[in-house]
Image (spheres, coloured by chain):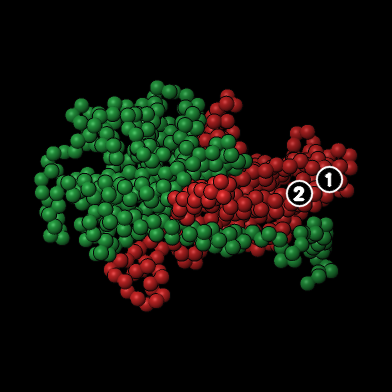
Amino acid sequence: MADLVDSMLDLMRRLPPTRTEENVNALIGVCPDYADDLLGSVDQPLQVRTDRLTGREYLACDYNRDGESFRSPWSNEYDPPLEDGTVPLPKLRKLEISANEVFDTYREMYFEGGVSSVYLWDLEDGGFAGVVLLKKTMTPATPQEPSGSWDSIHVFETAERGRQAHYKLTSTIMLQLITKKGSEGDNADGDKKNGEKKGPESWKRDGEVTLSGSMTRQTEQDWPIHDASSHITNTGKMIEEMEIKMRNLLQEVYFGKTRDIVYDLRSVDDLEKTRRQRELQKELLGSFKR
Amino acid sequence: MDSRIGAACSFILQSPPGEINDVLNDVRNIISDDETLEEGVLPALKEYNLAQFTTVDVPGTEHQVRASLSIISEAARLPTSENGEERWLDPRSKTSFGFNHLTLEASDPQPFEPDADAEEFRYVSNNIFLTFDDETATRSSLEKASLTYLLAHFHDGVASVFSKQGAQNQYLLQIVANKYNPSNYWSGRWRSEYLVNLNENTVEGKILVNIHYYEQGNVQLSTNHTISITLPSAVVTSPPSSAALKILALIETEEGKYQTSLNDTYHEMSEKTFKGLRRALPMTRQKLDWDKVLGYKLGAELSSSKGAFSTS
């Protein structure tokens, strides 16, 4: 029933991104047998958790989950503790430790805050796969200040081919921005400046603007490898390039595209006036031709 | 209630503009029990249509405006008749009709004559006797002014003006504008509603905008904005036709201001929030030197494990 999963994913692509968690849970309630398919293919906002051993924050998602427990990249321990939780083989764990250190620097350079986590796992065919997670939240000091959150999920798979490695990267960025506004006053704004009172007209305005969503992009590339740590620099370069590209894309869609559509619905300028002017021009042009 | 139906209803109510059928198809596939579903989700479909100001082409009515459509909303709902049938009002053509919330089709149009009881004189707070005819005149003046406003500012808009049921001298102006562009993966809806209360001399309004962009993603803009205006006495004491024009001029100013203020909000979100979340490039204005970062990290790890040669 791949068809059913397709319908679930199509539905998730249409419903408000602000309610993803609630809707995924509702879908799991309807089709409990498909819980793993859903959790594995619908990106949800990353949860920040604290490693009980090191006190460091890490990110929880489906990739570091085993049952109800999540593994911390810093201590390699599951919380709640698991006797036989899945962990990477020692060689891969060593790479995972380095990757976490390196991407923590990346996080500081670009996000100047937030949390990062890298998880790696062995693949059956001998290669390995991993996920690089980054999250930053801006909490406003006052309700009038804008708030927002950025969640990056970069999933990659790699296969070594001699001195080359082939990488497949799927990146999803979830971005949410919220602004609340409220104002109150007498008369029109222009009148206030002149200090004139023009009558008893007064107004009050309140509102909220929410821009939220996610975008996903994929790329496949080959890079040379010298030793195991080459995988970190290679995926690092790919992810950096991808985030720069996607940041531009998000900027275009969030602040350009959605705004343009608002203007496709309503025009600030008087459309009738424009229409009349155009007709007048046509008439004038016509009289010249005659 | 079947919890599956509860989930289905919740999904339907969250449908983005113009995508109710896509959502419904997905839900049908997921529930795969059409019989239970169709009956179960009907209340949700109705709630969605009312809240979203769903537009309908009422057969036999011909409005002059290019959008010859009627709005389905709470204000358009007529008191349920004895046989339990629900009917809706197109105030412009004074037509009542039945409406199917699943197929979104109107049926059985009938000329609508307002309640005769309302024809008696009414006593209104500001010591003016208002007749039923006055109220009709005010409503149609507001309707005329609304349609002029609609043509001036909306590309594909529909507007309806209703006399508020069970209240005197109160009118509901509703506007909806939709644009659906599935081949380019976007859709949008603008809704505004104003309660013009000529007893209190106020206009209470709200504007709701929903945009969905879903090319290789799912991005949604959702805004809500409420306005309350106290009408100057010069407006209230004018004859209906000029009062209506003045009220619509105030609404035009408010909606224009709101749309312009959205630009400022966009600017602020882009310049403050977006940039604050993630920089375009690091402070160094250069991409990371990955080999150097890796080398440094590995070096730091080695020296810390040896305990000696600490760099700090």
Judging by the rendered image, the residue that carries numbered circle 2 is A238
The picture's colour for chain A is red
Judging by the rendered image, the residue that carries numbered circle 1 is A223
- Residue B95, given in percent of the width and then of the height, sits at 27, 34
Name the residue located 55 percent from the left edge and 28 percent from the top edge: A4
Other-residue count near label 1 (Cα within 10 Å), few / some / many at <14 / 14–19 / ≥20: some
Work out how far the residue at label 1 is from the one at label 2, CA to CA, in angstroms: 10 Å
Choose top left, top right, bottom left or bottom right for residue B251.
bottom left
Quarter of the N terminus of chain A within the rendering = top right
Q: Which chain is green?
A: B
Whether residue A195 sits left or right of residue A82 in the image: it is: left
B124 w.r.t. A14: above or below: below
Name the residue located 46 percent from the left edge and 35 percent from the top edge: B20
A267 w.r.t. B276: above or below: above
Whether residue A94 sits left or right of residue B242 in the image: it is: right
Name the residue located 39 percent from the left edge and 56 percent from the top edge: B252
Parent chain of label 2: A
Q: Is label 1 in contact with label 2 (beta carbons under 8 Å)? A: yes
Whether residue B115 sits left or right of residue A3 in the image: it is: left
Q: Which mark is residue B142?
A: none
- Residue A33, given in percent of the width and then of the height, sits at 54, 29
- Residue B103, given in percent of the width and then of the height, sits at 40, 28
Name the residue located 75 percent from the left edge and 66 percent from the top edge: B284
* Count of numbered circles on the image: 2
- The residue furthest bottom is A195
A56 w.r.t. A95: above or below: below
The residue lying toward the viewer, choosing from A89 and B291, is B291
Residue B252 visible, this angle: yes
* Callout 1 amino acid: Trp
